[in-house]
Amino acid sequence: MSDITNAMKQICEEKNLSYDAVIETIESALAAAYRKDFGEKNQNIKVEFDPETGKSKVYDVKTVVEDMPEEIENDEEKIEGAEEKKVEAEPAVTQEVPEEEVRKFNPKTELQIKDAKEIKKTSKVGDVIKTKLEVPAEYGRMAAQTAKQVIIQKLREAEREMIFSEFKNKEHEVVAGVVQRREGRIVLVDLDKAVGVLPAEEQIMNERYRPGDRIKVYVKQVAITPKGPEILLSRTSDEILKKVFYLEIPEISNGLVEIKAVAREAGSRSKVAVSATSENVDPIGSCVGQRGARIQTIISELGGEKIDIIEYDEDLAKFIGHALAPAKILSVEIDNEEKKAVVKVAEDQLSLAIGREGQNVRLAARLTGCKLDIVGEKAEKAKTEEAAPAEAAAEVEAEKPAVEESGKEEKKKKSKKKKEE
């Protein structure tokens, strides 16, 4: 194995590039160097490089095309020629005319068939003719500098394409990364082979990102820029919550439990509606885990965000009741046309249903997809309902001493009769 081959393999390991990509880079660099010192104007230089021997072969590669018509200098002759072509092309397919007019002969990469037959009599249109050129013993200083620049540029482009294709496949997925540094309000996250950007609007409020911290991030978008692939990350997306549930809870990844809906206010509170595909599976218990182990792992991954797990129900009224937990619901009136629901709760449950700054009802509305109006029931109705059983109990208690007194009087009468006798 030659030194060149060892160096190429080392580059492949360091840059995580394919062996063929490195060979193509070297061949492009040698072609650029040859063109710099020995190339002519209309030559299409291609180099074949053998890494084992370190030798190369240089060719002028051209594609055989049909003979092109001679250019007409006079404008009047051009117009007449164009009119004749139109008349002749009327019975034929009209699409061929603009193709013939637009097509131009490129002497650098193409060779007319009449010239090709002088080189090789059996030449046909579409054949590739490779003319071997003399390989120089050595290149000049400028040519070597050109080759160096081409190698650096081509390797950088190959590395960028590799990173882009790899992370494009990971788009809309959750990946682990290490916080690298901050640049203003932007956080740069090391994703092993690339660096992702976590902008301010995608960061969780009040969450601190210290260099060296390991975090899970959602790959929101991967795009190509002049500086290379740009990987846009997020910590606030609803999708990251779904993906973390998918990674941490086996029942969800196996399909036994399904996430029906998610409503999230990143860094504060989230509601997740789940349902079981099998009757023997408890969806809420599966997500919470033994002594809350699973849900606590998810909460820590999301920076201490509170998560409410709610059982999904096909009955919208019941689903709304579950979504407004921990508040207790008295009744739900649904308007399907306007997708609106009026929810009645007891007055002491009103603040619990609405939540701090309206957060509970806001998340419940997003989870169910309905506009929710929370109405508090009057205290009089609640008092009358509670007073009825209380009065009945008081009557029973009042009857007890009366019965006891009557029993005592009867005993006294009996004792008097015995004494008289």
Image (cartoon, rainbow, N blue to C red):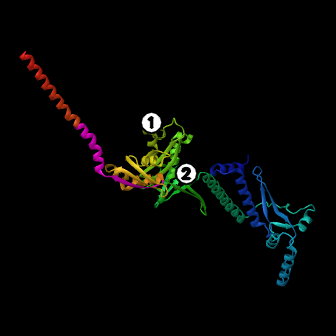
Q: Provide the secondary structure element on which disc 1 rests.
A: helix
Of residues 161 and 3, which is closer to you in this image?
A: 161
Q: Who comes first in sequence, dot 1 or dot 2?
A: 2
Left or right of residue 348, residue 114 in this image: right
Task: Answer whether residue 50 is visible to the viewer in this image.
Answer: yes
**Residue 259 higher or lower than 82, as above or below:** above
Q: Which residue is drawn at the image coordinates 83% and 63% (left, top)?
A: 63
Residue receiving disc 2: 191
Quarter of the image with the C terminus in it: top left
Find residue 236 and report its horizontal and vertical position in percent: 48, 54
Residue neighbourhood size for the residue with mark 2, other residues' Cα within 10 Å, grouped as few (<14), some (14–19), many (≥20): some
- Magenta region: 369-394
Q: Amino acid at mark 2?
A: Leu
Q: Position of residue 393 (x, y in %)?
A: 25, 37
Q: Which residue has dot 1 on it?
A: 290
Residue in front for this viewpoint, 414 or 52: 414
